[in-house]
Image (cartoon, grey):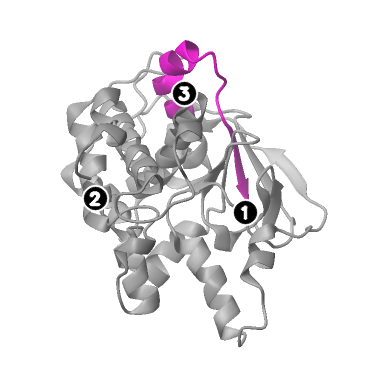
């Protein structure tokens, strides 16, 4: 997915942090990858590590913080940090009417390395990208995309990365519109509210992707992105499949247990992303009204 020439994106919109130490936070995330990695650490240590301690988040070291400067379209097409900044800029514009209706602000976005303190606890790369409702912020370590490819077989690519960011932004929209609080996030299973939340965020990501090539930057009048090719769409669908609960469980455990799902199967995640992409309206993403997921 290519940003249009002439675009200028995101000065100061994304914060970068480094040196924050280790830990893991709990919020709304793209998949169960981080949790499984944390549990694997405990198991490989002979059971001497308490997973709850890993997830609770101890303190990290001193953090250094800066903001991402304005990026050109060429930079957004070649540099991962600039791509994040430009994607957030495009998401801000797309969701602006809905945010205005909800009388809500845009989410904060933090790209970190090593670890960082969040409103949901201490986060590390093992946490995976997530949205934290208490501080209304999206957190991600950009190295997560390499982990998806090297450990879970993801194809990767620009639109795959944008899908992850758009999914987390979808959690912000759920939070500010009250959906997050109304859902029972304590349960698991293929038909649980937890899965419905994640599939809806996938649908919201598809919704944004379907409109990204027609959404114009209000400052420049230039559309953010060129039309999505079939190969680029395949990148996003592959990423959605890679973070499916069944795929992750098969990779990590050698079997599938739908009763423990929190994010949905690979097929479900692809289908709901595609539903948003093709139908193009928020009503199509009402997973809580769906009889079958």
Q: Are marks 2 and 1 in contact (CB under 8 Å)?
A: no
Residue nearest the observer in this picture, 52 or 251: 52
Magenta highlight on residue 96: yes
Residue nearest the observer in this picture, 214 or 33: 33
Q: Residues within 10 Å of mark 2 (few under 14, many from 20)?
A: many
Q: Are marks 1 and 3 in contact (CB under 8 Å)?
A: no
Q: Is residue 139 left or right of residue 56?
A: left
Question: Is residue 44 something one can see in this rendering?
Answer: yes
Q: Marks 2 and 1, Cα distance to the nearest angstrom? A: 25 Å
Looking at marks 2 and 1 on the same chain, the residue that comes earlier in the sequence is marked by: 1
Where is residue 239 drawn, in percent x and y? 32, 54
Q: Residues within 10 Å of mark 3 (few under 14, many from 20)?
A: some
**Image position of 238 with respect to 162: above or below:** below
Mark 1 lies on residue: 25
**Which residues, given as a range, are shown in magenta?**
89-112
Where is residue 99 drawn, in percent x and y? 48, 18
Q: Marks 2 and 3, Cα distance to the nearest angstrom? A: 23 Å
Mark 3 lies on residue: 177
């Amino acid at each position: 997915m290519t940003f249009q020439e002439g675009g200028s994106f995101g000065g100061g919109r994304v914060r970068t942090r480094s040196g924050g130490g280790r830990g893991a936070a709990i919020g709304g995330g793209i998949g169960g990858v981080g949790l499984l990695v944390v549990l694997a650490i405990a198991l490989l240590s002979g059971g001497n590590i308490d997973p709850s301690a890993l997830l609770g988040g101890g303190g990290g070291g001193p953090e250094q913080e800066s903001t991402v400067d304005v990026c050109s379209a060429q930079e957004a097409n070649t540099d991962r940090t600039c791509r994040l900044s430009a994607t957030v800029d495009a998401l801000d514009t797309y969701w602006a009417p809905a945010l205005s209706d909800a009388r809500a602000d845009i989410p904060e976005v933090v790209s970190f390395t090593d670890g960082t303190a969040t409103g949901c606890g201490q986060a590390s790369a093992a946490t995976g990208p997530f949205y934290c409702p208490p501080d209304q912020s999206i957190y991600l370590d950009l190295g997560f995309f390499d982990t998806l490819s090297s450990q879970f077989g993801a194809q990767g690519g620009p639109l795959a990365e944008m899908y992850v960011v758009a999914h987390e932004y979808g959690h912000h929209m759920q939070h500010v519109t009250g959906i997050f609080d109304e859902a029972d996030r304590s349960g698991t299973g293929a038909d649980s509210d937890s899965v419905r939340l994640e599939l809806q965020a996938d649908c919201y990501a598809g919704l944004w992707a379907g409109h990204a090539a027609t959404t114009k930057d209000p400052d420049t009048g230039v559309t953010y992105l060129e039309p999505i090719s079939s190969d680029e769409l395949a990148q996003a669908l592959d990423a959605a499949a890679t973070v499916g609960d069944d795929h992750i469980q098969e990779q990590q455990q050698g079997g599938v247990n739908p009763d423990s799902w929190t994010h949905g199967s690979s097929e479900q995640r692809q289908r709901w992303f595609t539903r948003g992409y093709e139908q193009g309206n928020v009503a199509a993403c009402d997973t809580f009204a769906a009889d079958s997921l």
